[in-house]
Amino acid sequence: MKAFVALSLMLCLTACLSNDAQKAKQMLKLFHCNGIESSQMQHNSVTQYFEQSLYSSKSKAKAYIEKYENGEEPSEMPLYDAVTQQYDLYKSACQNLGGIPAKESSS
């Protein structure tokens, strides 16, 4: 009986963790900034900062997911929350560059 309960708990935990990874991968698909053309943009320290923010936030989100898939905890917070935090930074940088972030689905 104890073995059954332990196995059930492990399966439930695995399902919850893989659901977190799936949600994080779906969120990663939103890391697109539409409506900005780098060649037409005036380049100064502010635009360079936001362009770097676009790159680094997407890179960090990818790295969190890769670490998670390799069995490592990517940060102190759950994977989906960590990726969402990076997406918020990405979306803000996109908007500050005059772009339009990808639309989030309501599901």
Image: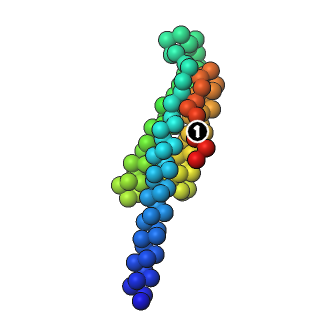
Q: Where is residue 75? Give x, y as percent.
A: 50, 54
> Vertically, is 50 above or below 43?
below
- Indicate the secondary structure of the residue bearing disc 1: loop
Q: Nearer the viewer, residue 55 or 30?
A: 30
73 vs 104: above or below: below
Residue 41: x, y in percent?
56, 13
Residue at image coords 44%, 64%: 15
- Determine the residue located farthest toward the left in the rendered image: 70
Q: Is residue 100 left or right of residue 67?
A: right
* Location of residue 91 with respect to 43 vertically, above or below: below
Q: Amino acid at mark 1?
A: Glu
Q: Residue furthest bottom?
A: 1
Whether residue 75 is visible here, answered yes or no, is no
Q: Which residue is mark 1?
A: 104
Image quadrant where residue 102 sits: top right
Residue, x 54% and y 24% (percent of image)?
34
The part of the image, by quadrant, that contains residue 94 is top right
> Looking at the image, which residue is at 41% across and 57% down?
72
Q: Position of residue 35 (x, y in %)?
A: 56, 20
